[in-house]
Image (cartoon, grey):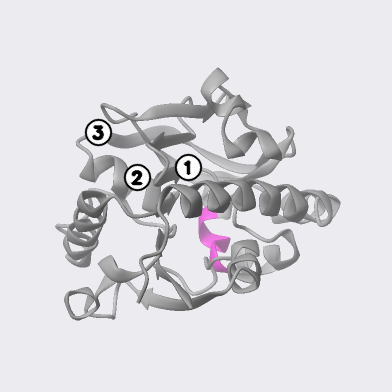
Amino acid sequence: MKTAMAIRHLEFEDLGTLDALLTARGYSLRYLDAATDDLHTVDTTSADLLVVLGGPIGAFDDAIYPFIRDELTVILQRLKSQRPLLGICLGAQLIARALGAGVASMGVKEIGFAPLSLTPEGEASPLAMLDKVPVLHWHGDRFDIPDGATRLAGTQTCTNQAFSMGRHVLALQCHLEADPHQIERWLVGHACELAQAGIDPRALRTDAQALQSSLPLAARAAFTAWLDEIEAACPREAP
């Protein structure tokens, strides 16, 4: 059986719509909690896919949250192995940092549903499967594009929303994995952030309800296309 590991920072910011897709494709899933699990004791390099999920801390906050250093070590090992790696929000920022790129505050929060604006390279990537369907944005930091990486998408608020490195690395600032059926968990979990940003959770709830059919289908199509690519480019070694 193929294996997928996901490093998470908040329980409700999980694999979302990607969970069922991976299971359907024959992956066994294992979550690692960045703040409490000892990443040094886990062989993350052997997994067929490693996903680093989002969270409400910064990619350079290791002085405050020392476990970030362990995550960076895992990411660097994964990059060296050239095995499939997916980063989402904080995870994407950590990949950018590991590749030597900057990560900094935008000075504004980008929270809500909006479509991505794809670059020509993005139009030729799995992200083209989104077909301009709005996706969830929930961040205040942004990453620079690492040297050697390919910029795939942006928004008006955040110029860099996605990049790839070869076929084995995909970094997404947006939460393409977020299931709109589960938006209530986000609204409660991030209630303080929403209040501080002056964002009405009722508006997010309404937008999520309108996307309950189209967004999961579009996300599944994009992730399916990417998984097809990485499984072709990085075939699983025979046991």
Question: Magenta span has 20?
Answer: no
Q: CA distance from mark 1 to mark 3?
A: 14 Å
Q: Residues within 10 Å of mark 3 (few under 14, many from 20)?
A: some
Q: Give the magenta range.
A: 189-193
Question: Residue tagged by mark 3?
Answer: 101
Relative horizontal placement of residue 201, taking residue 153 as reference (left or right) = right
Question: Residue tagged by mark 2?
Answer: 93
Of the residues under marks 1 and 3, which one precedes in the sequence?
Answer: 3
Asked which secondary structure carries label 3, the reply is: loop
User: Mark 1 and mark 2 in contact (Cβ < 8 Å)?
Assistant: yes
x then y, percent, for residue 149: 34, 30
Q: Which residue is pictured at 81% across the width and 57% down the height?
A: 212
Q: CA distance from mark 2 to mark 1?
A: 8 Å
Can I make out residue 158 in this image?
no
Quarter where residue 143 is shown? top left
Relative horizontal placement of residue 105, taking residue 209 as reference (left or right) = left
Asked which secondary structure carries label 1, the reply is: loop
Asked which secondary structure carries label 2, the reply is: helix
Q: Which residue is pictured at 22% across the width and 48% down the height?
A: 60
Residue nearest the observer in this picture, 67 or 233: 233
Residue found farthest to the front: 238
x then y, percent, for residue 193: 51, 55
Provide the major secondary structure of the magenta segment.
helix
Question: Residue tagged by mark 1?
Answer: 173
Residue nearest the observer in this picture, 77 or 34: 77
Above or below residue 218? Residue 9 is below
Of the residues under marks 2 and 1, which one precedes in the sequence?
Answer: 2
